[in-house]
Image (spheres, rainbow, N blue to C red):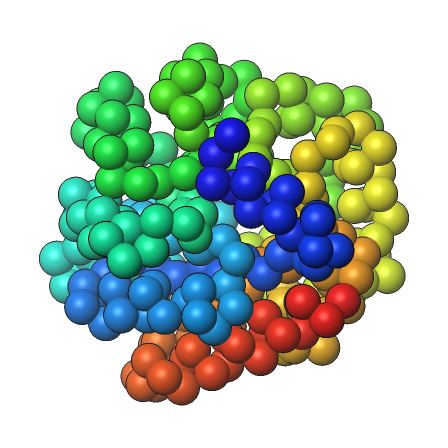
Amino acid sequence: MTRIDAKFAALKAENRKAFVAYIMAGDPDLATSLDLMKGLPAAGVDIIELGMPFTDPMADGPTIQLAGQRALEGGQTLQKTLDMVAEFRKSDPQTPIVMMGYYNPIYSRGVDRFLADATAAGVDGLIVVDLPPEEDDELCIPAQKAGLNFIRLATPTTDDRRLPKVLQNTSGFVYYVSITGITGAAAAQATDVGPEVSRIKAATDLPVIVGFGIRTPETARAIASVADGAVVGSAIVKMVEEGRAVPDILGFVGGLANGAHSA
C-alpha cells in the first residue's frame, strides 16, 4: 500500500473528500517553491502534485506554461525536483507526493535510474500526460513494479470503448479532467462532472479526483460533492506568478481545502 492508498483509505474512514494541490517545482525559485510545498499539508492539502518543468508542456495553459519557463530559467532540473521531495520528506513522512509532467525528462535520465531515484526521494506516484496506455511497458509497468502509483487521466472525450484501456494499469486514483482543453481554461461545472464521475466509478474501484477549472472554495466544494476530491493547480500557480507571499498563497489554499473538505 502506497501513501496515496493509505490517504484515501483514511479519508474514506473519515467520510471526507480529498483536496489535491499542484505547484510547479522551482517556481519562482527553488527556495520559495520548497517553502510553499512544506506549508501545503498544514493548509489542508491531502496530496501534493509537484510539477516537473518541461520546455513543451502541451496539456498546460499559459499559467502553468509560464511557471515551467520561470522554473527552467531559474535553473530548476529534474534532479533539483527530486531533491525537493527528499528535503520535504525530512519533516513530512506522510503526505503523498505525485510528480506530474512529461516523459522526455524521465526518458533522458533513464527510466530505471529515475524510478530508483524517485522512490529513494519519497515520491509516491506519477502522472505523465503524454504517455498513452499503449505505451505502458515504457514507464507505467516499471513504475508499478517499483512501488509507485501510475495515475491516468480520463477526459470528457474518453468514451466507454476507450475507458477500459485507460483504467487497465492505473493505480492510486483516476484524475478526471473536467473540461475539454488545457489547464486554467473554462470553469468546471458539477452538473457536467457528476455523470462522468459516476460512469468512471462504475468501471473501477479507484477514487476519482477532478481537476481543471477549479478556482474558488465554492467550486471545490461543488466538484468534491460529486467526486472523491478536487484538484487545484492554475489558480495557485497564478498567485506565485503575481509574486504573492507564501503565507498569502497558503491562506488561499486553505480556503480551497476547506471547500473540498466541506462537501
- Judge left or right: residue 247 versus residue 176: left
- Judge left or right: residue 192 versus residue 114: right
Residue at the (73%, 40%) spot, across then down: 157
- Judge left or right: residue 41 versus residue 223: left
Residue 232 coordinates in the image, percent (x, y): 55, 64
Residue 171 found in image quarter: top right
Q: Is residue 246 above or below residue 110?
A: below
Q: Nearer the viewer, residue 163 or 142?
A: 142
Q: Residue furthest top?
A: 137
Report if residue 95 is visible in the image: yes
Residue 134 coordinates in the image, percent (x, y): 54, 17
Q: Nearer the viewer, residue 89 or 105?
A: 89
Report if residue 53 is visible in the image: no
Q: Is residue 31 above or below residue 56?
A: below
Q: Residue furthest left?
A: 75
Residue at the (84%, 43%) spot, across then down: 198
The quadrant the C terminus occupies is: bottom right
Residue at the (58%, 70%) spot, across then down: 257
Residue 132 coordinates in the image, percent (x, y): 53, 26
